[in-house]
Amino acid sequence: MMAARTYRRTAGTRILAALCLVLFVAATVSAASGAGATPGFFILLGLASIAALNVAAAFGDRITLDDCGIEVANPWLARTGRRARRVAWDDVASIREHHGLRPGGRDAAPRAIFLGVRAGRRLVLDSLEDFDEVIRTVRARTGQ
């Protein structure tokens, strides 16, 4: 029996998301005060909106691994009607690890895991705290 363990995005990912939001909101305010409602303002407004969604994802995502499988939930986005996604371990058809590039070759440790689900959709696990533990758990549970 495995105790359920919940993982969050890394602190670096959350900080980067927040900094992007601050940057795009400041740029949008600057464009609005300088030139008014120009096409550039609307582009920056769209980018600021995307950055706000990124902040909601980075700060709200909760990935839980337990005996039954993987659950990806976000309590912030649940208020908009987005439900948690649950994938049973038996439904994982394939695992593909993504290794980042560095000078001289590929990284030894994977930076992301792409889980192929029998229903056809993929589940991506990346930028998580204790990522090495996540990888070990997924490999052990799927037998790979």
Image (cartoon, grey):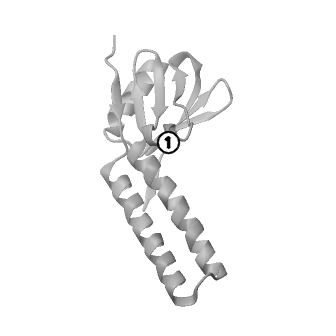
In the depicted structure, whether residue 64 falls above or below residue 28: above
Residue 122 location, quadrant: top right
Q: Which residue is mark 1?
A: 77
Residue 22 location, quadrant: bottom left
Instruction: Compare residues 2 and 112 and report the one nearer the observer.
Output: 2
| Residue 62 image offset from top left, x and y in percent | 40, 36
Q: Residue furthest right?
A: 120
Q: Is residue 83 visible?
A: yes
Q: Secondary structure at mark 1?
A: helix
| Residue 43 image offset from top left, x and y in percent | 61, 73
**Given the image, on which type of amino acid does mark 1 rest?**
Leu
Q: Is residue 108 visible?
A: no
Instruction: Compare residues 74 and 67 and report the one nearer the observer.
Output: 74
In the depicted structure, whether residue 18 falls above or below residue 8: below
| Residue 138 image offset from top left, x and y in percent | 44, 26
In the rendered structure, the answer to whether residue 118 lies left or right of residue 70 reads right
Disc 1: CA contacts within 10 A as few (<14), some (14-19) or many (>=20):
some
Image quarter of the N terminus: top left
In the rendered structure, the answer to whether residue 43 lies left or right of residue 127 reads right
In the rendered structure, the answer to whether residue 102 lies left or right of residue 44 reads left
Residue 134 location, quadrant: top left
Please name the residue shown 67% across and 25% down the image: 119
Please name the residue shown 53% across and 82% down the image: 32
